Image (spheres, rainbow, N blue to C red):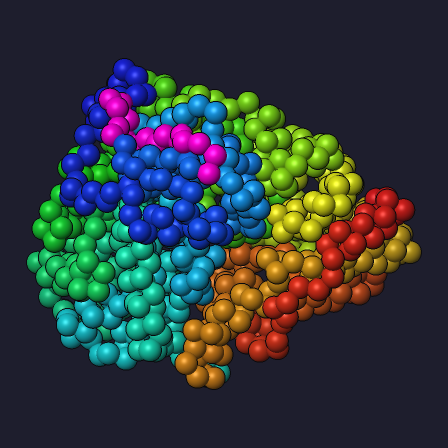
Amino acid sequence: MRTFSRRNFVLGTAATAFLATGVRGVASAVVPADTPAVRAAIARLLGRSADQFTLRQLTPRTGETDAFEIGGAPGAITLAGTSPVATLSAFHWWLKHVANGHLSTNADRVALPPTLPAPSAVIRQSTELAERYAYNFTVFGYTSPWWTWSEWERELDLLAASGTNRALALIGQEIVWYDTFQDFGMDELAVRQWIAQPAHQPWQWYGEITGYDEDASGFSGPVSVGLLERRVALGRKIVGRMRELGITPVFPMFTGQVPDQAFADLHPDTHIPAQHDYAGHPRPYWLDTTEALYPEVAQRFYRAQSEHFGTTTHYSGDLFHEVGTEELPGYLDGANLGEAAVAVQNELDRAVPGAIWLMQGWQDNPQLDVLNAVDEKRVIVLDLDSDDSRKWQDTDAYWGVPWCWGTIGNFGGRLGVFGNLVEPGRTLPDVRRSPERQRLAGTAWVQEGTYNNPVVADLLGEMTWRRDPVDLEPWVLAYARRRYGTDDPHAAEAWRILLHTAYSFAASGHSTGEGPHETPFAMLPTLNPDSSASNFGPDRPRYDMDAFMPALPEMLKVAPAVRSLPTYRYDLVDVTRQVLANRGRQLRTRILEAYQDKDRDAVLHHSQRFLRALDLTEEILATDRHWLLGPWLEQAKAWGSDADERAILEWNARSMLTIWSIDAAPSLHEYANRDWHGLLSGYYKPRWVRFLNALPSTISSGVEPDFSDWHTRGDAWSRQQELHTTTPSGDPHVVASRIAAELAGDPV
C-alpha cells in the first residue's frame, strides 16, 4: 500500500458517516418540505392534480441526513419528508413501488386510476449521504446547451425526485467573465471573442479551451450580447427553481483562468503564464493565484456572480484540469501548487465565508500537495469514476478528505445500450459500510452526456434511499413492469437478456475504453478490428453480441397493449438500433476477412450488407423523436436572434457531434458521435460509401484506402444548413419487426 502524509479517518458505521465528514460550510436555508413548489412539481410529474396528497414535515432520526415516509389511505396519500427533495423522493418511491408508475428522461408511464393507491403499511426510507451531486460540466455541452425552460423545468423535477440535492448550475455563468474582465481593462468585443459558444463552454470552465476569432466564413465567434442576456435569464430561472425544490445550486469558481495575451499585456508586472494547448486548442492564460492581482480579479468575479445569481454554499472548479503530473511544472511556470490552491480557497472564503470547494477526482487531480495545503473542512472531492478507475481506493479514500462516490458510465453523450448496474446496486452499498470509505460524504452522478440508458439513472437514484445491496434480476424485472405497466413475460425475458449482457458487471472484462462499444457506422472508415468511432471508445465489444441478439425478438413479442407506450417505443428503437450496430461490427469483420483472402466478390457482397444495416438503422431511428438529429439543430438555431447568429449556433451544434471544433486534434473527432437519424445518412454513410467503393481496387496490395481529408470534409458538413426533420415517422414495432425478419433471413 502507498504511504501518504495525510492522516486517515476510520469510522465505525455507515450510519454515522455523514457526521464525520467534518465539512464546514455556509448554512443552507432550510426549505420546508411542503411548499407550493413541491406540490406543483408533483402535479407536473404526475400529469394531474396533486390534491390526493397531503404533505408534511418529517424530523430526521439519529444517523439520517434526509428521510421520508409514505402512508395514508387510497385517495388520501401522506408524503412526509425532511426536505423538499426528500418529499419529492417520497412521491417518486410511491409512484414506483406503490402505484407501479414510471418516470425517466426517456418517456414516462403515469396512467393511474382515478383513486390513487396507498401503501398497506407506512414506508420509511432514509439516507446518511449528505451530498447527492449531479452533473459533469460536460453535460452542458453534450446534452443541454440548447435547452429552454420547458426542458429544464422537467429536468429539475426529475433531479429532486431522484434524491439529488446538489447540482451544477452553469447556464448563463459566462456573463461573469464578461463583466469581470472588462473591469480589468479588456475591450468588450475582445471578451466576447474569448468566450466560447454554448456547446463548448464547459471546457472553457475547465481551463482547456477559449473562444474563437471569427473566421472567413463567419461560423465561429464572438458570442452576442443578446445571447449572453438570454442565457443569464434562463440561468437565473434554473437557480431559482433549484432553491425552491431544495437543490443547492453549485456555481463555477475562479481558479485563475483568464483571457489570452491581451489580458497579460494589460498587466505586464504580474505572473500570467501561457498554458500548453489542449487537444489542439489554446488554453486560457493562468493568473498565478499567489500574485497580488489575483484577489482583486477573484473578488470581482464573485461579486459579478452574486449580482446575477446570488451566492450559494458549494462551488466547483479545478486547478489545471486534465493536466498530468509530468506536465504540471510547465503549467505552473514556477508557482507552488499548494500555495496556489490555498489562495484560491482563501478568496472563495472571503467572498462567501464557509463556502465548500468541490474538487473533481479525475486523472491526476486533486494532487496530494493540494489536499495537504487547503482547509479540508471546506473541501469535498467528487470521485468521477469510482466504479471503474477506483481512484478512491488508490488514494486511500482521498487521503482522508471528504469525498463522494461517483460514476460516469457515459462519455461524450455517445449512445449504446450499456451501463453497469452492479456498481450502484451492489458495490456502492458495500462501500458505504466499509471502513475503507473513511469520510464518504455522498454520491456524484457525473455522466458526460445524459438522456440515455434510463435504467442506470433509475437504480442510482433509488440507491440513495437503500442501505443494502440489490438483487439485480428481480429489480430489473420490476423496472420493466413499471416501465411497461404489465408483467409481460416477453418484456421480462428481454430485460433478463439486457441485464446479463449490456448491463452486466462482466461486461467490463471484455474490453478497455470508455463507455459502450460504439456503432461502427460512426467510425472513420477502416477495417482495423480494434478501432472505435472515438479514440477513447472500447477497442472490442463490451459483451457477447450474439447473446444480446435475442432481446429484439422478445421485445417484439410483447402484448399489443404495450406497443403504443412511449417507454416501450423508445426501448424498442434502442434495442433494434443496438442489434444493427452489433451486426455492423460483425459485417465489418466479414469484409476484413474477405479482403485478406483477396476475395473481391465477397468484399463487395459484405460491403453492401454493411451499408444495408446502416440504412435499416436510419429507418428505425426515424420512428422516435429521441433519435432525430433535427431537434438538436433546431433547438440550437432557436437561440439565435438573426440569420447570422442562427448559422453560428448551428455550426456549434454540428461541429460538437463530428469534428468537435475547428482546432480539435484528431483525438477528439467523433468523440460525441450519435446514432441519430439524419446524421447516419447525411454524414456517416457518405464516408463509408467512399471508402468501400475504393476498397476493391486495393485488394491486390492489401493496403486499405487511406484518406487524409476526413477533418476537412467534417468541417464542411458542420457548416451546412440543410434541414432535418423534427417529426418522427413510421411505427417502431412495424419497422423493427420487418428489420428482425430481414436479419433472421440473412444471418451474419
Residue 405 visible? The answer is no
Q: Position of residue 61 (x, y in %)?
A: 26, 24
The answer to which image quadrant residue 310 occupies is bottom left
Boundaries of the magenta span:
59-75
- Left or right: 490 in relation to 93: right
**Residue at horizontal 55%, vertical 22%?**
471
Q: How many marks?
A: 0
Q: Is residue 465 above or below residue 611?
A: above
The verdict on residue 353 being magenta is no
Residue 143 visible? The answer is yes
**Residue at horizontal 54%, vertical 69%?**
633
Q: Position of residue 100 (x, y in %)?
A: 55, 36
The answer to which image quadrant residue 431 occupies is top left
Q: Is residue 473 above or below residue 41?
A: above
Give the camera-side residue of 560 and 216: 560
- What quarter of the picture does the C terminus occupy? top right
The verdict on residue 71 being magenta is yes
